[in-house]
Image: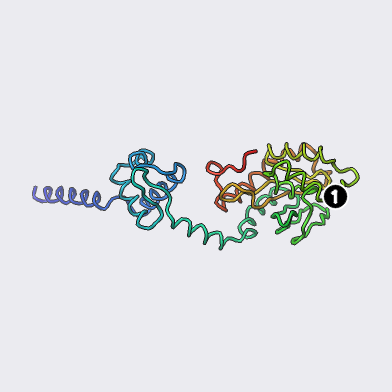
Amino acid sequence: MKRDASSGAGSVAKEDSSRVKGPSGSQTLFRGLDLLDVVADSGAIGLPALAERLGLTRSTTHRLATALVERRLLSQTPREGYGLGSKLLELGYLAGQQMDLPRLARPHLERLWEELEDTVHLGVLDDDRAHYLDKLTGRRRINISSRVGDRQPIRSTGLGKALVLDGTEARWRELYRKEGPPTPGGPGEEQWIEWMRGYAKRGVAFDLEENEDRIRCVAAPVRGPGGQIVAAISVSGAAQYMDDARMSALADDVRECANAIGMELGWNEKRAPGVKR
């Protein structure tokens, strides 16, 4: 009986000890990260609402929030509640400095390339031109003349159009006119502006043999943390393999790949969906 009583007391003591210690280290970490996500989504938020959103007691939420305030990951303002802290600005700046866009994007481009038979590009806007940063050559026996380091026109390339999808119509007209008269068979200004309106609504852009004879492509913008377009990707192939139906079908794949790269850069569709036209 003594042993039983002793065993029971030890059991109770053990349970009380676990209550004092609280959740495990990894659980605490994840709860802290969830707390940061809630504050990022909500803006300034008071303790009661924060605890309710997290599904935790006020005392547990207060302990987590206090620890994050001490590390400057959260800030606290009387009557307003908790907001994101200045330490996150430092970390964001350092992350941006350490990121190498081609290296970060390459695994996503390779996955897209593995699914397709076509050439995949990555590029950025540079002085009103599309600057190609990476290229994965397609497996079909087709030569696409683009090269890493090339700076191609905005008006005639899918990649270029995707890079300026958030522009105003005035900006689009400026870019169109900057490249001079249209090439034979190329779209006039009004036709091109109409295409750009449609591309902007859909979030993808096409090159319909405008830049290179018998070559078509589907392109989509990559967005940064604030929702701004920071790069674009494209899938290019011979017109015989890129009829209208296939280009339409590829749009979702290209857009999803671009969005995945954007998320690596810190873009969040719910928080920063991009510029609204």
Q: What residue do we see at 55% from left, 51% from top? A: 266
Q: Is residue 96 above or below residue 38?
A: below
In the rendered image, which residue does mark 1 sit on?
180
Q: What percent of the width, then of the height, locates residue 214?
A: 86, 47
Q: Nearer the viewer, residue 118 or 210?
A: 210
Q: What percent of the width, then of the height, locates residue 138?
A: 76, 53
Q: What percent of the width, then of the height, locates residue 152?
A: 78, 55
Q: What residue do we see at 48% from left, 56% from top? A: 89
Q: SS of the residue at dot 1? A: loop
Q: Nearer the viewer, residue 182 or 214?
A: 182
Query: The disc labelled 1 sits on which kind of residue?
Result: Gly
Q: Is residue 196 above or below residue 223?
A: above
Q: Nearer the viewer, residue 276 or 79?
A: 79
Q: What residue do we see at 69% from left, 55% from top? A: 124
**Would residue 87 appear left or right of 161 to someone viewing this image?**
left
Count of number-bearing discs:
1
